[in-house]
Image (cartoon, rainbow, N blue to C red):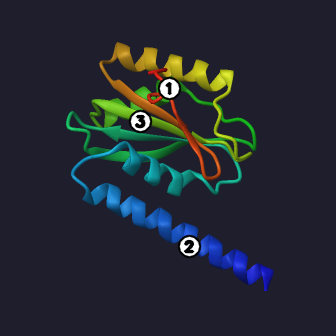
Amino acid sequence: MVWRNMRSLKGIAELARRYFSLRMTEEPSLVTPSMTREFLQSQLADEEREIFMVIFLDNQNRVLKHSRLFSGTLSHVEVHPREIVREAIKVNAAAVILAHNHPSGSPEPSKADRLITERVIKCCRFMDIRVLDHLVIGRGAYVSFAERGWI
């Protein structure tokens, strides 16, 4: 019985991921921060290890692509700013939204999270790519660097 319920919950989570992925490609742009947050929560909230994801946007904030660029362990993901910039140039992105999850459940950014965000911003700025936000997704909660005034 417990396994059946767990499979059902995983199936529901997968449906939510697919729904929001489809919605991202159908919508003309990321109209609201809540739409972006809902999408990222559907993609990252139930992961068992840290995943770093990037949404690549054009000048009108239309989604060009979203990608899980880096995958890590339970408590750490290695992020390479160069790879983010390379992918942004490849898809001709004018802006990016960064996101990663904290499988522990607490979305509070670590010092390392803030430092890597600063490094990504510097690398992107050099290539005229705007970093609009970095969201850290926990279980049922999130932290937005932009909302906190860190970006």
Q: Could you tell me which residue is drawn at 56 percent across and 73 percent down?
A: 12
Dot placed on the residue nearer the N-terminal end, 2 or 3: 2
Relative image position of residue 13 (x, y in whole percent): 56, 67
Q: Earlier in the sequence, mark 1 or mark 2?
A: 2
- The secondary structure type at the circle numbered 2 is helix
Residue 12: image tag:
2
What's the amino acid at mark 1?
A: Arg
Mark 1 Cα shell of 10 Å, populated few (<14), some (14-19), many (≥20): few
Q: Position of residue 97 (x, y in %)?
A: 41, 35
The Cα atoms of the two marked residues, 1 and 2, are separated by 32 Å
* Above or below 97: residue 9: below
Identify the residue shown where x is 75% and y is 44%: 74
Question: What amino acid is at disc 3?
Answer: Ile
1 vs 2, front mark: 1
For the residues labelled 1 and 3, say whether their Cβ atoms are less than 8 Å apart: no
Labels 2 and 3 touching (C-beta < 8 A): no
Whole-Å distance between the Cαs marked 1 and 3?
15 Å
User: As drawn, is 62 to the left or to the right of 65?
Assistant: left
| Amino acid identity at mark 2 | Ile
* Residue corresponding to mark 1: 148
Q: Residue at the right extreme?
A: 2
